[in-house]
Image (tube, helix red, strand yellow):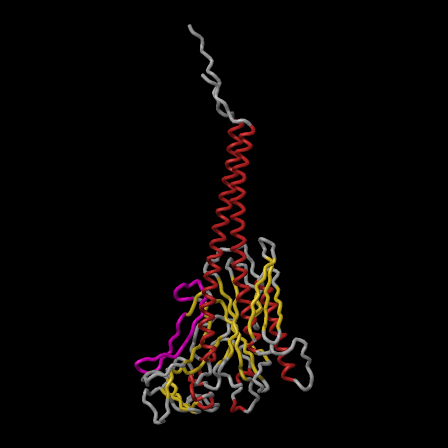
Amino acid sequence: MIGRQRQPHAGGVTLIELLISMTIGLLVLAAIVHALTLSSRYLRRAEALALMQEQADVAMRYLYDDLTLSGHWGVAGRSENISGGARSSNDNPDGLALPTRCTPRFVTELQQPVMAFENPSPWGCSLEAVAGADALVTRYAQPALVDPQPGRLQVEVTPGAGRLTASGVPGAAALQQRHDYRVAGYYVAARSNLFPEQPVLRRITLGAGTAGPRFVDEEITQGIETLQVRIAADSNGDGVPDAMLDAGDPRLQLRATDGGHRYQAMAVTVSIIVRSAEPNWPNETSAAFELADLHWQPPADGYLRASASRTAMLRNAPR
Amino acid sequence: MRLARGFTLVEVLAALAIVGIGLTGNYLAFSRSLQLQHHGIYQSRATALASSTAESLLAGRTMQLADDLACTEGSLAACAASSWRDARIQDARREVAGQLPNGAIGLRHDTHRLTITVSWRDTLSLLRSEHALEVAL
């Protein structure tokens, strides 16, 4: 019988070598997986921040455009020259056919081309606004000259004079020009219709309808959690702002006919806080926000937040 | 049968060094991209903060005034304008500090030009960066 022949030494690895190499391999793999996870998290964060930036830009563009045009009355010049606007004793002196959703004064307060409130309830439109966010309204004649249009509120102007009209019938004045009248109220609602978990900046404007002017209440951009407004006002008539007034400050509400000393709005600073769509960042804490009269420490709810501010000069304010 | 020959220690070390260099390169590129991403976010915030500061200062049209303009009885308007400017700078300082890590804002102006500098210290790279905005007066 032939005895079992010893195999030549095979050049394999020992158990120890195998364990060590597997450990090293696992460590390298873990490092790579960690780096990938980190990178995808940062990528999602960067995407969320970019979207927030875009939402803030959209909101600011809407607000800024309306603010810079506010108080524009074409060749009529100042608000005081336009008839049909609210007087202290009469909200609708010319009996314009206005829709009933909001108070007539929301439309006809021409003496105040820009007004800021603690919330939109003074407009009387029964809007579902979020608590703590300001509301802003701007009024002006749109720059384009237009033809008479029944069902739309328009401003007929001649140099130094003008009137609000909704009839669509041209008046008699020879030098008459006509602009569409614009009133735009901005406010923040807690829930968007499109994305119910997101807050939203909304705007209510006066549009045209077959049965007369009608209000249009629409979403502008999601993610806007608050709106804060401050008005740079001139108190002594030298054309230079010298007071920064928060929304709802009674000094801005005085009407010229009240005989009180009126603060003239010269510039408006709007600030917003924009919130990410998803609460995916539970470990991030945000610094406290200090915007106008808002001092707010956001809860640690996983949302990213950022603020943005812009100041618009009111080019049509009397100087 | 020929005895199978393993790697020598030198070969293994050389291979490890090559892999290590490769991985280090990857790591450096990755961390640099994170830093740049961070930087980009802060940079865009700084840009927005600088321009909103410029807007609010110019709303007062105060920068034509000299820095050390005194509040005298003869120039009440100038006095008001100067306090307006100081208040706006305080606002801007607060906003920059809230939105940028170690954020600070600097202001320089002469009769023709206003320069607003927003600076911050990145939390990842620990480097200080700044963004300067120049506006003509």
Horizontal arrangement in the rendering, residue A241 relative to residue A126 (left or right): right
Point out residue A21 in the picture as x, y percentages from the top left corner: 52, 32
In the picture, which quadrant includes the N terminus of chain A? top left
| Residue sitting at the far front | B112
Q: Is residue A157 above or below residue B94?
A: below
Horizontal arrangement in the rendering, residue B11 relative to residue A160 (left or right): right
Q: Residue at x 51, y 74 (%)?
A: A134
Q: Residue at x 50, y 22 (%)?
A: B5
Q: Is residue A289 above or below residue B6?
A: below
Point out residue A132 in the picture as x, y percentages from the top left corner: 52, 71
Point out residue A164 in the picture as x, y percentages from the top left corner: 39, 88
Point out residue A187 in the picture as x, y percentages from the top left corner: 46, 73
| Residue sitting at the far left | A210
**Which quadrant of the figure has residue A295?**
bottom right
**Which quadrant of the figure has residue A107?**
bottom left
For the record, the magenta segment spans A192-219
